[in-house]
Amino acid sequence: VPVPSRQAFPLPSLPRKQPTVLVVCGPAQNGAIGLVCARHLRIFDYEPTIFYPKRSPDPLYRDFTTQCEKMDIPFLSYLPTEVQLINDAYNAVVDAVLGAEAEAAEGREPCSAILATLKLLRIPIVSLDVPSGWDAEAGGSGGISPDVLVSLAAPKECARRFLGRQHFVAGRFLPYDVQKKFELNPPEYPGTECVVAL
Amino acid sequence: QEEAQAIDQELFTEYKFSVDQLMELAGLSCATAIAKAYPPSSFTTSRPTVLVVCGPGNNGGDGLVCARHLKMFGYEPTVYYPKRPSKPLFEGLTTQCQKMDIPFLSEFPAEAALIDELYGLVVDAIFGFSFTGAVREPFGSILGTLERITVPIASIDIPSGWDVEKGKADGLQPDMLISLTAPKKAALHFAGRYHFLGGRFVPPALQKKYALNLPPYPETDCVLQLS
């Protein structure tokens, strides 16, 4: 995920002087992927900041959090509702709030408040796997409109309704027999790239 | 060697990285470096076949990850893994390779000439930077055979059998070395064509603390060609 973020927003092209990126992480796997993404963005010389209000108790995800903290990636204690503050401080936002596995029953707060704020942003949003709040199959009307979508492993059904600038597939780890079994037909990755633009 | 071990220790105890995480990134770097230096089109064998020789420790684990990614990149790896630790990490990595139809040889090719015929490249994932002391069998014989092959060898982190700091003049002479995290002292004795740096996971603060002075990686690449 950090690789497509980088490809979509190469460092020299960022409008703000500091290559700041806000990574908003939800409570489950999608959020954990956001944590890993933030860490790699830092290695790539971006300046990520994380908002991770509902932290998973999963030991693996707790370790991801420690890795980010030890790398001096700041964790916000709250997300400003004043959208202009976010627009001014960051070049882009990574939406790692909800993934394809999100269920309607899962703690709506603070996710719905976060999503309401994200919807109003003017800076670009990069969504991981599924634009948060969208139904994984039907898509989202009235939901957030990301600029970039990074489908993990393979595009989900709702990706058909994606209208943003760039759609990447990332996660080059599916064995061929799994691809065949589920008739995934993923695009060819170029060379040793772990990301392909659709 | 001590410094490398100290950095590893900090990554695991302070930063809470898991061995799995770093091994995956390391193995991916190795496969990526190999693919850059030896693209499938460059192979003299009719298929891009690669023999990956995995030792009994973490270097072997790096080799298993590397083999899996080589398969994803379109190569045809075969693994020889005679001494397998009974730990879930290594068992998992082995299963992942097997499920991807990567064959595991039951015996090591007896002759150097046979390796030259069957494979276009050998990946040396036998011993890494923690290696000390004498080489135990079957690895002594394996290294003996590898010293006689003519196809290129790509060593992961340290050419196996070399002293980690001083090298080994009459030992393995690999064509490629992939230094993980930072080059070790032994790398000064490396005389092959390709030296790559891999394992792009060291936090900036650690790099400074140990004065690693690593040159910058290009963009989002996980490897850097040093020579």
Image (spheres, grey):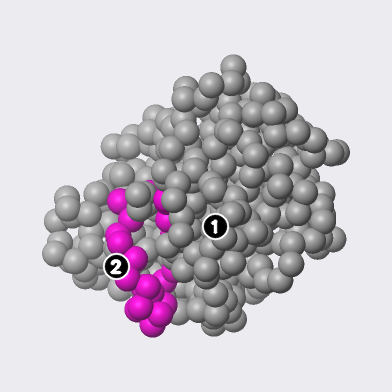
Against B51, residue B124 (above or below) is below
The alpha-carbon separation of the residues under discs 2 and 1 comes to 45 Å
Circle 2/circle 1 CB separation < 8 Å: no
Q: Nearer the viewer, residue A126 or B21?
A: B21
Residue A131 visible in the displayed image = no
- Label drawn at residue A47: 2
Q: Secondary structure at mark 2?
A: strand
- Name the kind of residue labelled 1 in the image: Ala
- Label drawn at residue B207: none
Q: Nearer the viewer, residue A56 or B39?
A: B39
Q: Residue A114: image x %, image y %?
A: 40, 64
Q: Secondary structure at mark 1?
A: loop
Residue range in magenta is B195-223
Examine the image and state in which quarter residue A59 appears: bottom right
Which residue matches tag 1?
A: B169
Examine the image and state in which quarter residue B145 appears: top right
Residue B218 magenta-highlighted? yes
Residue B183 magenta-highlighted? no
Indicate the quadrant containing the C terminus of chain A: top left, top right, bottom left or bottom right: top left
The overriding secondary structure of the stretch rendered in magenta is: loop
- Name the kind of residue labelled 2 in the image: Glu
